[in-house]
Image (spheres, rainbow, N blue to C red):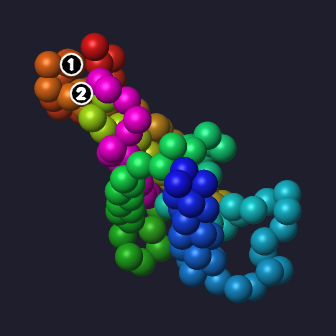
Amino acid sequence: MAFKKKTTFSLVVGCIVSLITGCDDSSNKADEPYRNSPPVLVALNSMGLAFQQDVSELHIMQVIGSRESPTTATVTIEERGLLDDSILARKTVFSMLKESGQWKINNRVKAQRCYPDRGHQDYSADACL
């Protein structure tokens, strides 16, 4: 069952990446897979290889500073349904700037919400009990 979930997640992410980046293989060099990528892909890539190994409910939101020539963006990645008895949800918020035509992470803030009777109910950097 876990293999099926991981495979399904990988296929979904692969499809999203293909849709966002298009089919032009000339821009997808092996040494620069996320060059000229939208903010959401930069954020997902920065989460590391262990991200979503234990598949959970995932909510991703991207907000661009302006429609015409955007220079700022915020990406929020929220994970729910984690295999943890104290953490209800985990959230990472990325602030990004566009520099020399590429999106770069300016700031990253991690927070978590605890289950009732296991700590704070709002998102906080404090640990759950």
Q: Which residues are magenta?
A: 72-86
Q: What secondary structure characterizes most of the magenta part?
A: strand
Q: Is 66 drawn above or below residue 49 in the view shown?
A: below
Labels 2 & 1 near each other (Cβ < 8 A): yes
Task: Name the amino acid type tagged 2.
Answer: Cys
Residue 108 forms part of the magenta stretch: no
Q: Is residue 42 above or below residue 69?
A: above
The numbered dot on residue 114 is 2
Q: Residue drawn 36% across and 53% down?
A: 57
Q: Residue pushed farthest front?
A: 1
Query: Can see residue 90?
Result: yes
Residue 63 screen position, x and y as percent: 35, 62
Residue density around tag 2, few if under 14, some if 14–19, many if 20 or more, within 10 Å: many
Residue 102 is tagged as: none
Residues 31 and 71: in front is 31
User: Within the image, what quadrant is residue 33 found in?
Assistant: bottom right
Question: In which quarter of the view is residue 99 placed?
Answer: bottom right
Which quarter of the rendered picture does the C terminus lie within?
top left
Disc 1 target residue = 118
| In the image, residue 87 above or below residue 76 | above
Residue at left offset 21%, top offset 19%:
118
Percent coordinates x, y for residue 67 in the rendering: 38, 76
Q: Secondary structure at mark 2?
A: strand
Question: Identity of the amino acid at label 1?
Answer: Arg
Residue 37 or residue 20, whichever sits in front: 20
Q: How many callouts does the rendering have? A: 2
Q: Nearer the viewer, residue 95 or 86?
A: 86
Q: How far apart are labels 2 and 1 at the CA level?
A: 6 Å
- Left or right of residue 59: residue 33: right
